[in-house]
Image: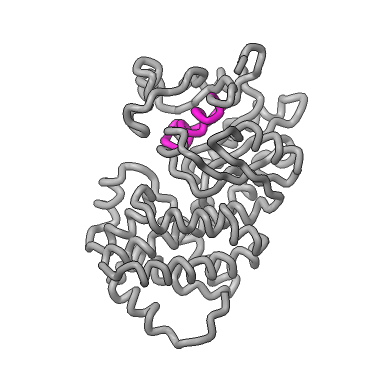
Amino acid sequence: MNTKNRLPLAVLGAGSWGTALAGLLAHHGHPVLLWTRDRPHAQEMITTGRNQSFLGPLALPPGVEPTAQFDRVVDEAHHYIIAVPSHAFRSVLNKLNEAVTACSEPPTICWGTKGFETGTGLLLSEVFDQVLGQTAQPAVLSGPSFAIEVAQRLPTALTVAARNETVADTVASWFRDNRTRVYTSADLSGVQLGGAIKNVMAIAAGISDGLGFGANARAALIARGLAEMSRLGVVLGGQIETFMGLTGMGDLILTCTDDQSRNRRVGLGLGKGKSKEDILSEIGQEAEGINTTRELYRKSAVTAVEMPITEQVYKVLFEDLDPTLAVTALLSRQATTENP
């Protein structure tokens, strides 16, 4: 596809997910600036044509240009895809603020980050509103997707949510091709909540498997995890249909059952008796479910929504509860009717 005279899209964050998304955009014919704040990392990608630290030997597709120059990014690009950890989300928006407010037309800012802001517990769309208000158009990309499989061009289905239908359609068109099916949604809150909450359930499923409790227990955790996701998600403004779709149940199944999931691997390590610090050192990347567990536990208390799986994961992560006792507590809860 001809990329001449097309403004580049900018992907902010050159981890595994940001790099995979940059490649997907480039395969669709977009010139892409892939920004990292780490100059040696940018130079390594420029020199080798790979993001060895995060995606191994896979070559960067033609059209992806790594850079550590943020000024260049905002000078050349008009629309942005953010793929940084949730704790860095606000700082990236702050960096964009001056450039965005100077634009004659509001740019679109889409993020693939899943989680809540640390400390405040805000959804990332709420952080967006605080920092940028009406000066840009927000969208979120989510769904059951491992970065390496997207980078390898394996079939994937995703969802783009935005408050504006035209924005959702436009952003979906950036990523949609014959290997990547992209749906749209107006449920910005629900899509974000599903993508965040499933990470906590993946830790729970990992703990269960790490303890050797088998497939029956894992299936029960997934099913009851979906119930917790739906209960809290609806209270926080999501639509029940969203949690039954790709960004809810679909993402939940993926992260609870495959060891590519960093959050599941956190749970596996905990179930095998490893410390949280040692597990994270082995993984070498962010595990968003840890912070999300803390924020979900707080939201459960504030909203009075019962979330027993989240409560036990919180106690394992932050109160050093023995994982076996956590599972025992779940199994010994008073029997009741199944009510998702």
Q: Which residues are magenta?
A: 10-26
Rendered residue at 53%/53% (across/down):
195
Could you tell me residue 174's position as x and y percent? 62, 31
In this view, 60 is above or below 236: above
The x, y position of residue 252, in whole percent, is 48, 58
Q: Nearer the viewer, residue 61 or 292?
A: 61
- Would residue 284 be counted in the magenta stretch? no
Residue pushed farthest front? 178
Q: Left of 289 or right of it: where is 182?
A: right
- Residue 81 placement: quadrant: top right
Question: Is the C terminus in the top left, top right, bottom left or bottom right quadrant?
Answer: bottom right
Is residue 23 within the magenta segment? yes
Relative vertical location of residue 56 with respect to residue 67 in this rendering, above or below: below
Point 57% across, 56% down: residue: 193
Q: How many marks?
A: 0
Picture residue at 48% right of the left edge, 69% below the top: 223
Task: Give the residue drawn at x 53%, y 25%.
Answer: 27
Q: Position of residue 99 (x, y in %)?
A: 65, 26
Task: Give the colouring mode of the picture.
Answer: one colour
Q: Quadrant of the N terminus?
A: top right
Main SS class of the magenta portion in the image:
helix
| Apparent side of residue 94 relative to residue 198 in the rendered image (left or right) | right
Residue 43 location in percent, x, y? 38, 18
Q: Spot the residue most to the top.
A: 4
Residue found at the very far left of the displayed protein:
273
Quick check: 155 above or below 258?
A: above
The answer to which of 167 and 241 lies nearer the viewer is 241
Closest to the observer: 38 or 11? 11
